[in-house]
Image (spheres, coloured by chain):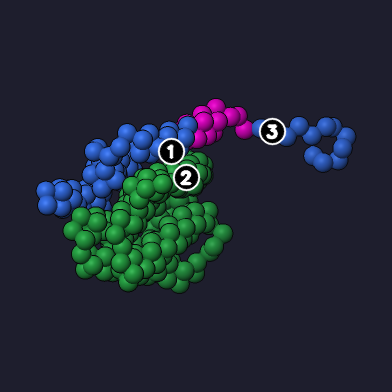
Chain colours: A blue, B green
Amino acid sequence: MKTGRNYFATYLVLVALAVGMMFTRGAASLGLAAIQAACFSLVFLELRHGRQLYRVIFLTGLAFFVLLLSICFIDAVTRETVQPQIPRGTGLR
Amino acid sequence: MTDGDSSEAARIGMWLFLAAEIMLFGGLFVGFALIRMRHEEAFAAARLHLHRSLGFLCSLAMLSGSLSIAMAAERAKRRFLVATLLCGVVFLAALGFDYASVVAPGFRPSQLFFGFYFVMTGLHGLHVLGGIAVVAWLAVRGYGRRIELAGLYWHMLTLLWIFLFPLLYLAA
């Protein structure tokens, strides 16, 4: 029954964070979401007490997501706008 | 293979499926973030058409569904499963109301934001519909240890919504 109480206590914290999110914007709301997700994963997905293998699988999925995110952002930030080079005399200018 | 082995194999299979789900939705999140970088003002303006209160209601429904399915696994009582079902229905109803309010007043489907909005929430809603079907089947046929797998699935949907809500409804 102790676990049931843990679930309920965590649920109240998560609802409070969701209410907090309603009054925030931008990075702050995403930050609250990250805290909410961490609490949720540890208690409801049982990453805190579950088998090591489950943690490895979950974190591998997350790592691939972070890899995708970072590579895409690096590409988007560093890429220069390409101006098409149209040869003179082609009548396309 | 013993019952314990098959149960463990099923759990590992479900975790692998959930990791694949993270990557599926992860691609959408990344696409959304990249397009938003280039069309920040258009996204901020389009977001005003959404109802934050309905998004919040969806959050409450998903969190409550997770609580009730965790309690169903913990205490083996059918009424908790029925509560999860109700939460799923409330979630879909709230999403439906939001869709109706967005589509009604001169909606232009060409807007990039709404392309992402409908794909991301629609895909999530389809997953919730699948979750409702599984929970209803378990409630009718009796569940045993399978409820833990259904619980994992539901929790993953809640985890995804935790990020969908601020990304679509709140981030300015």
Tell me the tag on residue A26: none
Q: Residue at x 87, y 37 (%)?
A: A90
Residue B80 drawn in magenta: no
Q: Which residue is mark 1?
A: A61
Residue A72 drawn in magenta: yes
Tell me residue A72's x, y (percent). Answer: 52, 34
Q: Which residue is mark 3?
A: A83
Q: How far apart, in angstroms, are the residues tagged by discs 1 and 2?
A: 7 Å
Q: Is residue B58 above or below residue A9?
A: below
Tell me residue A58's x, y (percent). Answer: 38, 39
- For residue B143, what is the image quadrant? bottom left
Q: Which residue is mark 2?
A: B20
Give the residues in magenta: A68-81
Q: Residue at x 27, y 56 (%)?
A: B66
Q: Residue at x 32, y 71 (%)?
A: B140
Residue under disc 1 on the same chain as residue under disc 2 = no
Residue under disc 2 on the same chain as residue under disc 3 = no
Instruction: Look at label 3 and name its amino acid.
Output: Gln
- Of all chains, the one bearing label 1 is A
Instruction: Look at label 2 and name its amino acid.
Output: Ala
